[in-house]
Image (cartoon, rainbow, N blue to C red):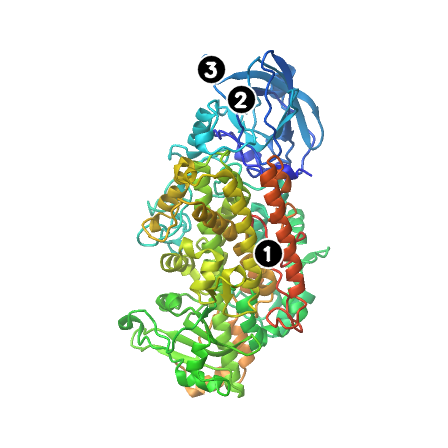
Amino acid sequence: MMTSQLYAPSFSLLPKSSINPNHLIKDGSPSLISIVPRYHVRQNRTKKKSSSLVIHATSGELKSSPASVSTVTSTENQAFTVKALVTVTVTAGGSSKRLNRPPDDNIDLLRKTLLLELVGAELDPKTGLEKETEGYAYNVSHNDDEVVYEATVTIPAGFGDIGAVQIENEHHEEIFIKSIDLDGFPNGTVNIPCNSWVHSKSDNPQKRIFFTNKSYIPSETPSGLKKLRESELQTLRGDGGGQRKTSDRIYDYDTYNDLGDPDHDDELVRPVLGGKDHPYPRRCRTGRPCTEKDHLSEQRSNSVYVPRDEAFSEVKQKTFSQKAVKSVLHAVFPSIEQAVLYRDLGYSLLDPNLSFSYFTDIDSLFNEGVTLAKPKTGRFFQTIMQWLVKTITGGKDDLLLFETPEIYKRDKFAWFRDDEFSRQTLAGLNPYSIELVKELPLKSKLDPEIYGPPESWITTEVVEKEIKGYMTVNEALERKKMFILDYHDLLMPYVNKVREIEGTTLYGSRTLFFLTEDGTLRPIAIELTRPPVGDKPQWKQVFTPTWDATGRWLWILAKAHVLAHDSAYHQLVVHWLRTHCSTEPYIIAANRQLSAMHPIYRLLHPHFRYTMKINALARESLINAGGVIESNFSPGKYSTEISSVAYDQLWRFDMEALPADLIRRGMAVEDPTAEHGLKLTIEDYPFANDGLILWDAIKEWVSDYVNHYYPDPNLIESDTELQGWWTEVRTKGHADKKDELWWPVLETPEKLIHTLTTIIWVTAGHHAAVNFGQYMYGGYFPNRPTIARTNMPTEDSSEEEFLQNFGKNPEMALLMCFPSQIQATKVMAVLDVLSNHSPDEEYIGSLKSAWAENPDIKNAYDRFSVNLKRLEGIIDERNTNMKLKNRVGAGVVPYELLKPFSTTGVTGMGVPNSISI
């Protein structure tokens, strides 16, 4: 196991490396793409020859992973030699596999493959210059997984501590260097994890640099490393110009101006997100040219640039790769469409709006499957589908048979029940929207001249009728018994726009819940509202869980609309905006402003793994114009625009901390005497109960770490890199909110600890809670429909039409409201992919070897790991406590989304360090 390398930061001066995109796919295997993340090493490898390397070593420290590296001092009075071993990972399809090309064989024969330059930590006191000594490394051994190069380097007398190693790759292709080991120092071997791509000298003459493992804040940087520290950051920042190549390692900012495709179709025009009109976080700049029809929009391409070491490892690539996503979109989806056509023989042309005819048709997706015509890319298609769905049968056709989602497996009728509808607001896929009602009547803040009367029709009388016998409405408000899902004001401005799109509809919605004596929620009213349109006035209606047949079916339809709203809000705001999108600026700023030898960079780096690549894939296929979200969720082409509105109106960094989020929604109040310093408004709130333990564990770990490196609080304000990072996060990464007064100022240990804890919570706990249950809860789509396609039958219909279209067959009316067959199966396939844990997943608290060199930090991390194991035990115990009705019961899916660890696959548990999928 190469555990120590998994979280190693990339320790390089990051010059532009040289990767020919055409070399990423080898031997006709599109699923094997040699894209390796900046710090990750687990890869499949194939046997190959190696090439020449040059290594320069500088005394000081290398930007490398948090693996064990000792400070080693040379003999002061005499020179000596050390053996340098460079381990290069063989990548399937990567350049390392092509090290047997004739020109490179010639380099190997000359024994000049890699130039190693060792750099001293301190400047030469006589000359004031960096101390350097070098030697060439050549191929000495290789196997299917690795190639080892060896160099003999003379260390001059008085050289001092090794601070860095610079590498010049004489090979004609880039290589992936796993580690450098320097053997022969008096105090033992120096191990420098690299885990990074090194470009060819022929493509870029600039040397790559790797610092040793000791962390330094800027003011404590050894004199011999100061220039290298700054030049490395300058390389990472780039010059702000030019189109990025696959091999580049440059981090810069841009707006979301690449979601539309105006040159392809006028229907694919989308606004630029980021700026005054549509505030938004920034993404990584690619430098692609603007479109011909819109100079503000960027041309789309087959692949989206991310800095070289931000890409996937080979293991990750095979589990969830660019090709895997494309296979779902371009191979599975068309086959699903054909299957729908074949199954409904009455249709001579494909109808994308075709509904399921019966609920048994939905059930058949899990027990009978959908027969898919085998595409020409049969072998690859079959490889992908074998992990995407349960089984592929041989023969003429392939059988798409979805895994049975946990909720359907435990209780196939759970989706139909009001108690489960309510329970999932606390322990389901979106536990972030439920909030306390503080006053009645409810009232919109929108302009009544445009949207109609602002007063809600969920009146005191309506509520009183539903809770009669329990308490009065005033008592319910005083005792904090009323809760709401409120999507009214966010969605109302888009209702009439969305209704112009064929095959979807929208309302503003409010759903009211009452907290019962046993701690569970009961839905008591749903209000759906349409603003005025044309000569029609505002329409609104309140639905309640009545007992007559007509009222009951209307209630079920109203719930379907609310669930579609909740699904869209969850995916666009709670999931995409608040985790993926908002985190990318932290990553870009960290790489531009924090040296890899900075302790805060090393702390945060494991929590940034794979996020930029995942976000690039999302822009390519999920949130783009005509992509998965727009095609299958209610807001349609306005989806990402709505997330921009949510960012503008709702997103605040200081509210992203879990305790602050709970307090803002009225789901908790500060209480110094209570556990976690908070008292929950609903005691049995599984997400909050488990999340607060995780939050506290993260905060304790971060506190120990920060207090170790900043024993004097004044060091925080004087840390130029730290302050530069946070300033850039605010002024560039979240530029549209740069003047907000709620941004924390990093001037005390407490504020730094809280800021870092918030970021780690968002990337780990928040994301895990809203991502890895997607297939478990959404795989059976009646439980969480992503779209409502028809209006309520009571809107603008005569009594005769109502009875004809709804009264005779309400089940069919519900099925027609649900996603179409094509939409449902497409979303199911994507949710299966997005809920999956890769075999190389790195879970929170699992990086013990990364901190082994520093005893104080190691002990703190060990305590962190113990706390996480304790959390696992607490969650297991809670899930057997029958008094906790929101997480335990007959047919109830236990709440495990915040259990720290998991096995591979779709498990509904596990908290990775980062937003890795």
Q: Looking at the picture, does residue 224 appear above or below residue 47?
A: above
Q: Looking at the picture, does residue 276 appear above or below residue 121?
A: below
Cα distance in 3D space between marks 1 and 3: 57 Å
Residue 15: % across, % down: 47, 29
The quadrant holding residue 412 is bottom right
Which numbered disc, 2 or 1, marks the residue closer to the eye? 2
Reading the image, the residue beneath label 2 is 59
Reading the image, the residue beneath label 3 is 125
Q: What element carries label 2?
A: loop
Cα distance in 3D space between marks 2 and 1: 46 Å
Of residue 72 and residue 429, the one placed in the foreground of this image is 72
Amino acid type assigned to the residue bearing label 1 in the image: Ser
Q: What element carries label 3?
A: loop
Q: What element carries label 1?
A: loop
Residue located farthest toward the right when viewing the structure as drawn: 394
The quadrant holding residue 857 is top right
Residue at the (59%, 44%) spot, across then down: 860
Residue 830: % across, % down: 57, 57
Reading the image, the residue beneath label 1 is 835
